[in-house]
């Protein structure tokens, strides 16, 4: 169904605001996504502070071209949505997590990361970076490991001296 000029301007304005206020964006290709699956996806994204907008490709491309991003806009075939957020990693990570269980219905087509258009491969790499809480846990474990080993060595030395 064709949109009227006023409605197109309204959508362009909304897309422009979303693009300006986002740190990163993911172009999501969806095909035969059921309403239930879409609801689950939107709920999961919302929990992580990620927005999700479906718009006509022509309007989306026009808004992205006006965004001043470097690089080349990835090819967007089929039905396309935009996942966006203030967190650099959350949009890609959450779409990727949903994609794991719905491979036939949804895929990452590319996106915008740090002001640059990136292709699907690069966006998948970004999506595989763990969240901050996981990274904090890994860091603490890394720092704690030598201390634990040192404590075990001291314990072994103490045991050998008491047995001797």
Image (cartoon, rainbow, N blue to C red):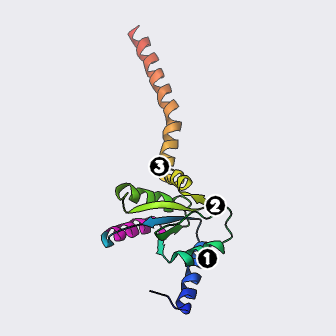
State which tag comes first along the sequence, 1 or 2: 1
Q: CB atoms at circles 3 and 2 under 8 Å apart?
A: no
Q: Residue at x 60, y 58 (%)?
A: 118
Observer-nearest of 6 and 145:
6
Asked whether 41 falls inside the magenta stretch, the response is yes
Q: Residue at x 55, y 64 (%)?
A: 75
Please provide percent x and percent y for residue 8.
55, 86
**As displayed, is residue 1 above or below residue 80?**
below
What quarter of the picture does the C terminus occupy? top left
Please provide percent x and percent y for residue 134.
47, 49
State which tag comes first along the sequence, 1 or 3: 1
**As displayed, is residue 139 above or below residue 102?**
above
**Residue behind mark 2:** 114
* Helix, strand or loop at mark 2: loop
Please provide percent x and percent y for residue 59.
56, 78
Please provide percent x and percent y for residue 100.
38, 54
Q: Main secondary structure of the magenta part?
A: helix
Q: Residues within 10 Å of mark 2 (few under 14, many from 20)?
A: few
**Residue behind mark 1:** 62
- Identify the magenta region: 37-50
**Residue behind mark 3:** 134
* Helix, strand or loop at mark 1: helix
Q: Is residue 90 left or right of residue 117?
A: left
Q: CA distance from mark 3 to mark 2?
A: 22 Å
State which tag comes first along the sequence, 3 or 2: 2
Asked whether 115 falls inside the magenta stretch, the response is no
Q: CA distance from mark 1 to mark 3?
A: 37 Å
Q: CA distance from mark 1 to mark 2?
A: 19 Å
Pair 3/2: label in front: 2
Q: Residue at x 41, y 56 (%)?
A: 97
């Amino acid at each position: 169904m064709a949109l009227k000029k006023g409605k197109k301007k309204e959508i362009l304005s909304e897309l422009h605001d979303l693009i300006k206020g986002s740190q990163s964006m993911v172009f999501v290709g969806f095909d035969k996504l059921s309403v239930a699956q879409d609801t689950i996806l939107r709920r999961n994204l919302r929990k992580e502070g990620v927005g999700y907008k479906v718009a006509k490709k022509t309007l989306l491309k026009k808004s992205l071209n006006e965004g001043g991003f470097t690089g080349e806009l990835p090819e967007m075939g089929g039905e396309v949505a935009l996942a966006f957020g203030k967190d650099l990693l959350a949009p890609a990570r959450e779409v990727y997590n949903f994609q794991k269980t719905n491979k036939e219905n949804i895929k990452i087509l590319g996106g915008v990361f740090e002001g640059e258009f990136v292709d699907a491969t690069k966006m998948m790499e970004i999506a595989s970076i763990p969240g901050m809480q996981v990274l904090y846990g890994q860091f603490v474990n890394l720092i704690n490991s030598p201390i634990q080993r040192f404590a075990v060595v001291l314990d072994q030395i103490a045991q050998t001296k008491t047995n001797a």
